[in-house]
Amino acid sequence: MAEIVCKGCGYHFPQPAEKGIVPCPHCSRPTRIPGAVLCPECSHLNQDVSYCVNCGAALFRECPECGSMMEVDQKACGECGAVYEEAYASYYGDDEDETELRPVIDIGKICGTLAALALTVLILFACWSAIISVQERIDREAARQAEIDRLTANFGRALEDLDLRMRLVPPYDEDRKFIT
């Protein structure tokens, strides 16, 4: 059974029975089955033809590096490995504006990166909230301990004052007469 290589992630998977476009099992990017060519102009799916049957646009071009035929929207040459942006620029000339007409943007990677970033922010927020909660608890405990220390010190001073006063008061008997 023939294998298909995803042009987005490079994953190899067995060719399904249906023709056309199937999602890559690894990255879910739409991947074309050999023989099915998507027109870069009108997005019509063509089977085994060199020109789009819907708009007439060319579906294949010659690789500027090795001369083999490759699809117009292919990222790299399957024969020599020339990178799509470089091959596209040399096919249309070295004008940088032409290469910017077809930016290579992998939405799957961008979405994955954004999801990972959002998850990281969520985890950081949860950690920050836990740290603030613990700090508030520590602050309350420290304030409580400081109040206990202050009251203990006041109580100690009060006992010392009472002891001192008890020593200054002369003893007396049951009739409230001072004993001399």
Image (cartoon, rainbow, N blue to C red):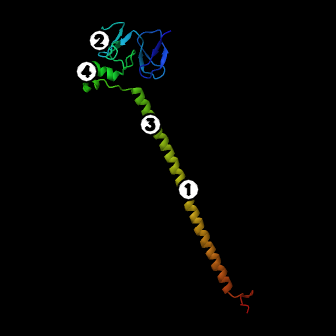
Q: Do the residues labelled 1 and 2 touch (CB within 8 Å)?
A: no
Q: Identify the secondary structure beneath mark 3.
A: helix
| Residue 117 numbered tag | 3
Gap between marks 1 and 2, in whole Å?
Answer: 72 Å
The disc at residue 93 is 4
Where disc 2 sits, the SS reads loop
Q: Earlier in the sequence, mark 3 or mark 4?
A: 4
Q: Residues within 10 Å of mark 1 (few under 14, many from 20)?
A: few
Residue 147, compared with residue 9, is above or below; it is below
Amino acid type, mark 2: Ala
Quadrant of residue 157 within the rendered picture: bottom right
Depth check, mark 1 against mark 2: the one in front is 2
Instruction: Tell me the distance, in whole angstroms, between the alpha carbons under discs 1 and 4.
Output: 68 Å
For the residues labelled 3 and 2, the Cα–Cα distance comes to: 41 Å
**Image location of residue 128, percent across then percent down:** 49, 47
For marks 1 and 2 on the same chain, the one whose residue lies earlier in the sequence = 2
Q: Name the residue under label 2.
A: 58
Q: Distance between the residues labelled 1 and 3?
A: 31 Å
What residue type is disc 1 on?
Ile
Name the mark nearer the viewer: 3 or 4.
4
Mark 4 / mark 2, whichever is N-terminal: 2
- Element at badge 4? loop
What x and y, as percent, mark residue 98?
26, 23
- Seen from the viewer's position, the closer of residues 165 and 134 is 134
The CA span between labels 4 and 2 is 18 Å
Residue at image location 57% in from the left, 65% down from the top: 147
Query: What type is the residue that disc 3 sits on?
Result: Leu
Q: Which amino acid does label 4 sit on?
A: Gly
User: Horizontal placement of 128 versus 97: left or right?
Assistant: right
In the displayed image of the protein, which residue is found farthest to the top? 48
Mark 3–mark 4 distance (CA, rounded to whole Å): 39 Å
Comes first in the chain, label 1 or label 3: 3
